[in-house]
Image (cartoon, helix red, strand yellow):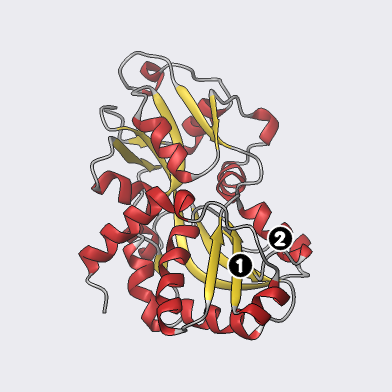
Amino acid sequence: MLDHGHGRALGAAVALCVSLTFAGCTDGGSERSVTSQRLVLTGSSTIAPLVADLARQFESQRPGVRIDVQTGGSSRGISDVRQGLAGIGMVSRGLADAESDLVGYKLAIDGVALIVHASNPLVNLTQEQVVEVYTGRVRDWRELGGAPGPITVVHKADGRSTQEVFLGHFGMDPAEVEPSVVIGDNEQGVKSVAGNPGAIGYVSIGAAEASAEFGVPIKPIALDGHVATSESVALGSFPLVRELTLVSNGPLSPLASDFVAFARSPYAREFIEAHYFVAVD
């Protein structure tokens, strides 16, 4: 079994380098994956580090099998499975009504945390304050009880499920948001806030906890008094949560089916928890 502390270290390390590890993996749809014992997964950068860990374990038990993991956002995962460019898509939310042509397999539960620089004295924001910050009605930290200084608003790019979940929770239209910086994956969000004491952003709780544990100068802040931790997500007390989902376009290929079963098996639970996600039964 995976040592829990070692697993968390491994998860954080993978989270920081997954884009390099899988750079250049561009082949394959589901049919090609079956004939060559190769499976391609594309999509959410939130899920990719976990899937990368699971893929290595799966490959070690299945000689001749190769699993390629590519990021690019949940929208890419949806598009690629529909076009046959990937056997499985990774989506960091549940499937929408307009995606009823796809089949979803819930992998885990995650939260979305607001993060600030570790030096920021702020510990909590209300829902109303978050909306005011992201729509430009509040532009200085002193208006929120913090030290005087301009707020740098870090926002996710279109096509990222974290953005969709964030905007949906706060009832904001994309056109209302006035970002200072637009980023793609969680790693970019963490780096943007860690490098700017006046910044605020939002990322996966898993990414935020792992980064803070490894000394990155960011901290998650509470939302309406609810602390942003994976434990709060597990207890059901944190309000901003989403499903992490693997998706297919119709029935899975035999290889994809085996991998999904492996990723959702009791064996995978410690890997899921090592990435600060909440396993589902």
Using the numbered discs, state the Cα–Cα distance from disc 1 to disc 2 in whole angstroms.
10 Å
Q: Earlier in the sequence, mark 1 or mark 2?
A: 1
Q: Report crowding for label 2: few under 14, some 14 to 19, many 20 or more residues within 10 A (C-alpha).
A: many
Relative placement, left or right, of 154 versus 190 is right
Can I make out residue 239 in this image? no
The residue at the point 33 percent across, 22 percent down is 145
The C terminus lies in which quarter of the figure? bottom left
The residue at the point 61 percent across, 60 percent down is 42
Of the two numbered discs 1 and 2 in the rendering, the one whose residue sits closer to the viewer: 1
Pinpoint residue 269: horizontal percent, then vertical percent: 37, 75
Q: Report crowding for label 1: few under 14, some 14 to 19, many 20 or more residues within 10 A (C-alpha).
A: many
Pinpoint residue 107: horizontal percent, then vertical percent: 50, 71
- Toward the viewer: 90 or 59? 59
SS for dot 2: helix
Relative placement, left or right, of 115 versus 1 is right
44 above or below 166? below
Dot 1 amino acid type:
Val
Pinpoint residue 37: horizontal percent, then vertical percent: 60, 79
* Residue 40 circle label: 1
Where residue 1 sits, quadrant-wise, is: bottom left
The residue at the point 55 percent across, 65 percent down is 68
Where residue 21 sits, quadrant-wise, is: bottom left
Q: Which residue is mark 2?
A: 80
Relative placement, left or right, of 255 versus 13 is right
Dot 2 amino acid type:
Asp
